[in-house]
Amino acid sequence: MELEVTREALTAMRAASAAAHPQEACGLLLGTGRRIIEVRETRNIHPAPATHFEIDPQALIDAYRAARSGAGAQVLGYFHSHPTGDPAPSATDSAMAAHDGRVWAIIAGGTAGGDVRFWQDDIAGFAALPFTIIES
């Protein structure tokens, strides 16, 4: 199933990746259905942020509360960067994934033009997701 992603969301993920380089950036993918309309950069609280990421739990709680109250978009998934790697799930990503059906976006490199790919984190592992860029 194809995702729709706003150009602004892609730009924001790439900017977060470039700003965090050489560490991993991370954050939330927000929207409705299969449409990502916003990203929310969060602090990477992992003790080894150059090679791992962990989304600040308070940011995640706040996003779920906002969605539940109707004041915010739904949390569709997560994004993070691979400062020196490919935009594909690593062995660490696979080991740490919840296999909950959420969408993951992974940004390669540490530049504002880094390649972004989307993945479905399912019980069987990660599957690539095609996407279309839309205007907001």
Image (cartoon, rainbow, N blue to C red):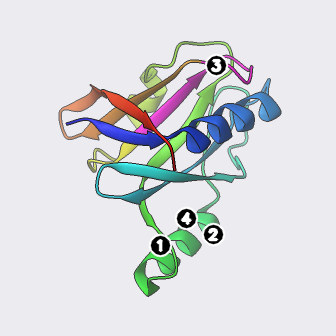
Which element type, helix, strand or loop, lies under badge 4?
helix
State how far apart marks 2 and 3 are (Cα): 28 Å
Give coordinates of residue 9: x percent, y percent: 57, 44
Give coordinates of residue 98: x percent, y percent: 34, 47
Mark identifier at residue 58: 2
Which element type, helix, strand or loop, lies under badge 1?
helix
**Which residue is found at the position 68% from the left and 44% from the top?**
46
User: Label 1, on which residue?
Assistant: 64
Discs 2, 1 touching: Cβ within 8 Å: no
Closer-to-camera residue (81/38): 38
Amino acid at the residue labelled 3: Gly
Mark yes or no: residue 48 visible: no
Give coordinates of residue 49: x percent, y percent: 72, 35
Q: Would you identify the image quadrant in which residue 82 lies? A: top right
State how far apart marks 4 and 3 are (Cα): 25 Å
Amino acid at the residue labelled 1: Tyr
Which element type, helix, strand or loop, lies under badge 2?
helix
Left or right, 122 with reference to 20: left
The mark nearer the N terminus, 1 or 3, is 1
**Which residue is found at the position 52% from the left and 81% from the top?**
71
The mark nearer the N terminus, 4 or 3, is 4
Discs 1, 3 touching: Cβ within 8 Å: no
State how far apart marks 1 and 3 are (Cα): 28 Å
Q: Was residue 108 drawn as part of the magenta stretch in this picture?
A: yes
**Which residue is found at the position 18% from the left and 33% from the top?**
124
Amino acid at the residue labelled 2: Gln
Range of residues picked out in magenta: 104-114
Discs 4, 1 touching: Cβ within 8 Å: yes
User: Label 3, on which residue?
Assistant: 114
